[in-house]
Image: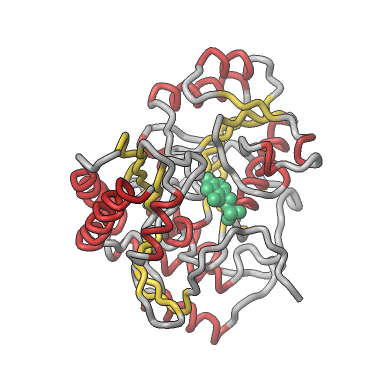
């Protein structure tokens, strides 16, 4: 049987990984500045993470959500502790898109409305409602296009006010820092306006932290740079360091009802143990705080690079925007310098989403390689 080919693939076959490196079948080492798309938070195969999952698997790996699973409460307590969101409630699922589906569905149940406001360049996933609120017609099938979504530019307070005043919208969904869209951020003033207008007109504010959450940007959630309280927060990627787990945090005003949300796999024993291990390592190794220090180091090193237009992002969700399209440069970094980087819908941007355990010396390796690759570009491209 052949694979259903939906991904353009690089010709690299990782067979093992350790901390910030992955190794191919010939034992060639690659520096991972992509983190498997912002998923690897505490480093590949962290010993504490491996041990905790192993121990859990030997006891019980899975049972359905029809029984008591104290690990879910442990995880809720640990997330509450590290995010300081003690009065939110946790619902667990398995992926980012599923977290978005649940957040939108909950907002719709809560408000009894069905329209959603999302933003230009937003990406929230590939499933039904998640893809509908993603600003990319090419990945929306006719089925998805039935959803009623209004896309607005960030920072257009007038347009937001006008739309929400209709009282037809169940939710405004935003990324504190856009991931796939290319690391743009709403202004501080606009973030406060979103919160104020959602309250005024009875819509839910959903912060999509699937990519930026769990310490990557230097605060536990990226929106926490501002003093706002979204109604719902979505999370996934870094939450499990590669184990599939996602979830939503639900604000105190939204009431649960049996049956309104549900899943077979979400919150299983193994997934909870993986995420607890992530939180333990994040705290023990102070990775969230280190993300800020490493951002400063990255910014200093990047200054003055040829062809560089902008350094974007926050913490360890960073980008270099050049005055040319970077697909060939990223290929050269992988094949000639053995460094993984990320792309985005902005074709001139290299995205840097490393494990949070990265050190200054790894950025030194990257910038040395980048300078050589940029010189080659001037000769060859
Ligand atoms: C901000 C954001 N939300 C949602 C998703 C969807 O997550 P998943 O691919 O786990 O379904 C992504 C994936 O890249 C994302 O970046």
Which residue occupies the foreground of this view, 66 or 140?
140
29 or 250: which is nearer to us?
29
What is the x, y in percent for residue 196?
50, 22
Q: Tell me the quarter of the image containing the N terminus.
A: bottom right
Residue 251 in percent (x, y) is at 55, 40
Q: Residue at x 67, y 74 (%)?
A: 63
Q: Is residue 242 left or right of residue 189?
A: right
Drawn side of residue 115 relative to residue 374, left or right: right
Residue 278: x and y in percent read 41, 65
User: Which quadrant of the structure image shows residue 20?
Assistant: bottom left
- Give the residue drawn at x 29%, y 49%: 374
Location of residue 369 by image quarter: bottom left
99 or 6, which lies in front? 6
> In the orientation shown, which residue stands out farthest toward the front?
379
Q: Nearer the viewer, residue 225 or 342?
A: 342
**Can residue 58 be seen at all in this image of the molecule?**
yes
**Residue 249 visible in rendering:** no
Q: Residue at position x 66%, y 40% from top?
A: 104
User: Residue 45 location in percent, x, y?
Assistant: 41, 75
């Amino acid at each position: 049987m052949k694979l259903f080919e939906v991904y353009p693939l690089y010709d690299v076959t990782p067979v093992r990984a350790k901390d910030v490196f992955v190794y191919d079948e010939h034992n060639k080492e690659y520096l991972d500045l992509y983190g498997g798309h912002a998923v690897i938070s505490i480093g590949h195969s962290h010993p504490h993470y491996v041990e905790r999952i192993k121990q859990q698997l030997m006891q019980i790996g899975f049972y359905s959500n029809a029984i008591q699973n104290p690990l879910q409460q442990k995880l809720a307590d640990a997330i509450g502790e590290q995010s300081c969101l003690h009065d939110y409630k946790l619902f667990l699922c398995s992926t980012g898109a599923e977290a978005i589906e649940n957040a939108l569905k909950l907002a719709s149940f809560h408000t009894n409305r069905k329209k959603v406001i999302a933003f230009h360049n937003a990406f929230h996933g590939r499933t039904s409602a998640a893809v509908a609120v993603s600003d990319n017609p090419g990945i929306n099938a006719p089925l998805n296009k039935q959803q009623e979504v209004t896309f607005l530019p960030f920072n257009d307070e007038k347009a937001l006010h006008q739309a929400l005043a209709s009282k037809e919208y169940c939710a405004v969904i935003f990324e504190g820092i856009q991931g796939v869209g290319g690391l743009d951020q709403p202004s501080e003033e606009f973030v406060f306006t979103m919160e104020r207008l959602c309250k005024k007109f009875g819509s839910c504010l959903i912060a999509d932290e699937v990519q930026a959450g769990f310490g990557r940007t230097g605060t536990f959630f990226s929106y926490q740079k501002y003093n706002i309280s979204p109604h719902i927060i979505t999370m996934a990627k870094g939450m499990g360091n590669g184990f599939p787990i996602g979830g939503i945090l639900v604000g105190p005003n939204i009431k649960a009802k049996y049956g309104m949300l549900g899943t077979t796999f979400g919150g299983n024993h193994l997934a909870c143990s993986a995420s607890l291990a992530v939180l333990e390592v994040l705290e023990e190794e102070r990775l969230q705080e280190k993300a800020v220090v490493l951002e400063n180091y990255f910014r200093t090193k990047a200054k003055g690079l040829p062809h560089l237009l902008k350094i974007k992002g926050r913490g360890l969700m960073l980008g270099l925007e050049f005055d040319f399209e970077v697909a060939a440069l990223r290929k050269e970094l992988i094949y000639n310098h053995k460094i993984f980087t990320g792309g985005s819908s902005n074709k001139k941007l290299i995205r840097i989403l490393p494990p949070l355990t990265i050190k200054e010396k790894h950025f030194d390796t990257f910038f040395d390689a980048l300078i050589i690759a940029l010189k080659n570009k001037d000769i060859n491209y």
